[in-house]
Amino acid sequence: MRDIQDIFNELEEIKQEQKRIRKDYKDMLANDGEYQLLKEAYETARAAKKDMELSIQASMGGAYERLEELAKERKALEEMLSDIAMTHLLKGESIEISDKNHNNYEPVYKISFKKVS
């Protein structure tokens, strides 16, 4: 099995190469006149789309506000579910969840790394 530090170093090199290639790509797009015209047309259409969305949201009134409340509530419940599942896992307990159609669900755990100051 490969050393974890070697894999991390290789991953960092790949990230740096991707960063360089993305920069070159963006530079080439910035220097393409036709692309710039299309980009401006896109921005104009996007602004018009946003205006229409805001108008429709305003006409919906409370229903759209309820949608936003439900999204916040859902996020909080998903976080709570995750915390409870992690607590059960650390206690060595099994986790069994099923929906109203009797479909069973199992937890999926992910480990990621973040930079330490």
Image (cartoon, rainbow, N blue to C red):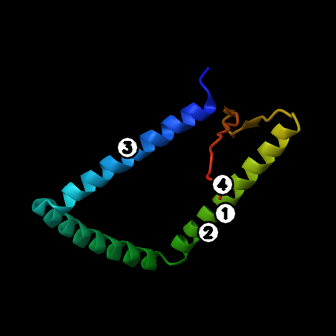
Instruction: Locate residue 98, reporting x and y percent.
Output: 72, 37
The amino acid marked with disc number 3 is Glu
Q: Secondary structure at mark 4?
A: loop
Instruction: Specify which label sits upstream in the sequence, 3 or 4.
Output: 3
Q: Secondary structure at mark 3?
A: helix
Badges 1 and 2: C-beta atoms under 8 Å apart? yes
Badges 2 and 4: C-beta atoms under 8 Å apart? no
The amino acid marked with disc number 4 is Val
Q: Quadrant of the C terminus?
A: bottom right
Q: Quadrant of residue 51?
A: bottom left
Residue that mark 3 sits on: 17
* Marking on residue 116: 4
Q: Residue at x 25, y 69 (%)?
A: 43
Instruction: Locate residue 32, reporting x and y percent.
Output: 13, 59
Distance of label 2 from label 4 (alpha carbons): 34 Å
Q: Residue at x 34, y 49 (%)?
A: 20
Nearer the observer: mark 2 or 4; the answer is 4
Q: Quadrant of residue 67?
A: bottom right
Q: Residue at x 26, y 52 (%)?
A: 24
Above/below status of 13 relative to 7: below
Structural crowding at the residue carrying mark 1, measured as other residues with C-alpha within 10 Å and reported as few (<14), some (14–19) or many (≥20): few
Residue that mark 2 sits on: 69
Instruction: Specify which label sits upstream in the sequence, 1 or 3.
Output: 3
Structural crowding at the residue carrying mark 4, measured as other residues with C-alpha within 10 Å and reported as few (<14), some (14–19) or many (≥20): few
Distance of label 4 from label 1 (alpha carbons): 31 Å
Instruction: Locate residue 29, reporting x and y percent.
Output: 20, 57
* Marking on residue 73: 1
The amino acid marked with disc number 2 is Glu
Instruction: Specify which label sits upstream in the sequence, 2 or 4.
Output: 2
The amino acid marked with disc number 1 is Glu
